[in-house]
Image (spheres, grey):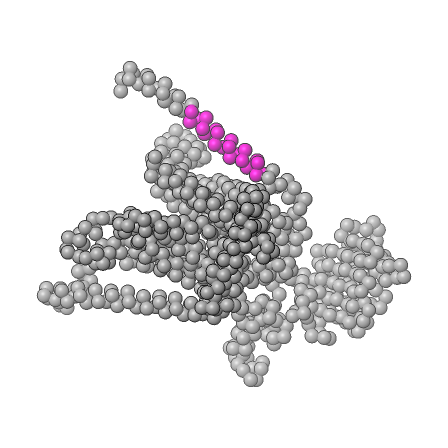
Amino acid sequence: MVDIAFGPEPGQRPDAGARHAAYLELTRRKRLYGGLILILFVALMASGFVLADDRNAGGFWNGLPMLTAFPAEVLSEAWAERSRIPGLMAGHLPALIETLNIALVSTLLATLMATVLALLSTRGLARWPRLTMPFRRLMDAMRAVPEIVIALVLIFILGGGPVPAVIAITLHTTGALGKLFSEVAENADLKPVEGLTSTGASWGQKMWLGVIPQVAPNWLSYALLRLEINVRASAILGFVGSGGIGHDLKLAMQWGMGSYAKVVAIFLLLFVTIVAIDQLSDRARHRLVKGK
Amino acid sequence: MTIALATPATGDLLDRFRRRRLAALAVPAAILAYLAYAFVAFDVAGLAGRARLDNAAIFLSDFVSHKVHVTRDNRTGTLTTAIEGEARGTYPAGSHPDWVTTDGTVTTVDLGDGHVVTYDDTGARYVVPGYGTIDIRPGEGGLQLTAPLPLPDWISTSANRIGVTTGHGRFTYTRSKVETFRYFPGWEMFFFTLDSPFYGKGAGELAALALWGDRVDPAQANLPHMLRDFWTNRMWRHGDVAWAIFETVLMAFLGTMGGGLIALPMAFLAARNINPLGPLRFALRRVFDFVRGVDALIWTIVLARAFGPGPMTGALAILITDIGSFGKTFSEAVENLDEKQVEGVRSTGANGVQRLRFGVLPQVVPVLLSQLLYALESNTRGATVVGAIVGGGIGLMLTQAIQTQKDWEEVAYYMVLIVLMVMAMDSLSGWLRRKLIKGG
């Protein structure tokens, strides 16, 4: 800091009394830059807001009072038929289980695939060190493709049902988890691996016995986090095209008036499930990372 | 270590090993059992029956190639050539590509490598090298097919329709029309449509025209003309696509930053070391939990009802969802901060606001900024999905193109653009993270 304030050339060095002024000058410049960035940010936000508002079908200010109209309509109708809701909730349980299965299967498969890909693309651990870069790019590409793109194309080819959703979520999750896994594995202690090398262990044995035990808690924690995300993604994919609770919700919404009790029942199922999974995985992750 | 001490421990150790080995077997077994259950529940075995491999073939061939339809209406005798059979890609009446020749009654379609299709007054013929001539005449009782026997399986026949599929093209004869498809690699009319004077010109020719060639249209210079024709391409709608991509990024930006701005003060109030009021903290936490629990899907639906389709709705949906997740992670970051720095500032006699500004903010800002930028990247991907639900941005264009079930080259184009967009946002957010946090 001081070096910058004084400047490099001895002849131009300000005297010691100017130190205070130099410091203030530095602070002023820092503040100026900070202020400029802030102004730029505010301008971007404001113009973006105006632009988005312009291109929206209904304006923001017109819509604001309407915000509660639809939930109120739904809730009042559902309240009138509240006795039916528990029955409806039970009726949609199979769809909920399908959604949960999609999330769980794809998280499991993705965790397994990400394990292999992460180990193959981590410097110092890779089976083929020259191929770390291609494996990394592969994971980047998998991560960049939104689930919906793959799901919609696969629905065209494979027909509806849970399999397109599973493949779509698995591919994306593999990319996302692979990157996180490899970041964890990079920090793993290499001494156990060296020890295993000295016993003549194969690459698989070195990874399984030397690396996985070290990284497992962190990896599992990331996988659980991903499970939370994937339950939501699976519900959304159902809404856009595949099966599960999202599809039921879409049908109930399309029906409109008269099926709002169903909408509320599905919503309650989804809400309770998501909150429960969040809480469970939160607790499990705390235990995994911070110890018991 | 003496032997006397080690002996009881060894037994214990072996016991633990045995238990561990059992657990190590049980976990994979449980996973396998679950996957087997899912295999049955998802009816994966039945998938083979339901899968439409012909759809996959259509999808893949559209991905890399396009076809040109040469169609004769058998009742009126009019001949049309259309790219992908679309009105937008139809050649003007009387003009055809150079592999189609016609003198009014006899039309010859050259599919290359000796494959020639001829339409004439009596019917149509397809000469397949190495096989022979397939001759079709409409008769009283239906279509009459004359071809070397036995008929191969790439010729399909029924009373009213005869189809021939070879590696060079597809040929279909029905009572009302006769149609030949010729396949070409690449996406059709990607740069210019047929009505543009620049259609069908090579890269060198276009560069020459742009730089020193005579004006194609005397009213305007070639380069702006070219750019405008490209931008307003009716087939690919490059201008609209660019707007849609921009809208998607805008949704992600407004949603992430707006959510961050709103969540920041709430997160401070929900942090134990900032706010001493327990009930308020508890209430705020439950608000975050509620917002996250309701889920983006529901928020998106509710907002779409109020604000109609468009990017604003998408941005608000992302914003509300992010308030929940940011509120939680931000308040955790604030709770984890180092008290020593705050103590130091307090020792100089700073008041509450000053302690916050000089003791707390410098510690948490880098953490929050990095979370914000991570979210920006993942929200760009999310904005595609939200756009598909609320009807805005590239997500909407993608779902529309998929729903037509024929413009797969456009689907491919959008997919490539979405992946590039997400990758660009990924590197942008990574670059900003390095600049703002590590570079200071």
Depth check: give the residue in front, A219 or A77. A77
Give the left or right position of residue A169, taking residue B188 as reference. Answer: left
Give the left or right position of residue B210, taking residue B344 as reference. Answer: right
The mark total stands at 0
Q: Position of residue A19 (x, y in %)?
A: 13, 64
Residue B310 in the magenta stretch? The answer is no
Q: Position of residue A263 (x, y in %)?
A: 55, 52
Q: Residue at x 45, y 35 (%)?
A: A204
Q: Is residue B392 visible?
A: no
Residue lying at the far front of the rendered structure: A80
Vertical placement of residue B197 versus B430, above or below: below
Q: Position of residue B116 (x, y in %)?
A: 76, 62
Q: Quadrant of the C terminus of chain B?
A: bottom left
- Asked which quadrant contains residue A182, the reply is top left
Residue lying at the far right of the rendered structure: B140
Q: Which residues are magenta?
A: B19-39
Q: Residue at x 61, y 41 (%)?
A: B44
Depth check: give the residue in front, A268 or B347. A268
Q: Residue at x 59, y 61 (%)?
A: B400
Give the left or right position of residue B425, taking residue B84 as reference. Answer: left
Depth check: give the residue in front, A14 or B401. B401
Vertical placement of residue A6 versus B13, above or below: below
Vertical placement of residue B67 versus A83, above or below: below
Vertical placement of residue B111 versus B76, above or below: above
- Asked which quadrant contains residue B124, the reply is bottom right
Depth check: give the residue in front, A16 or B165. A16
Q: Residue at x 51, y 59 (%)?
A: A70
Q: Is residue A50 visible?
A: yes
Q: Which secondary structure is most common in the magenta stretch? A: helix
Q: Quadrant of the N terminus of chain B?
A: top left
Q: Position of residue A92 (x, y in %)?
A: 57, 45
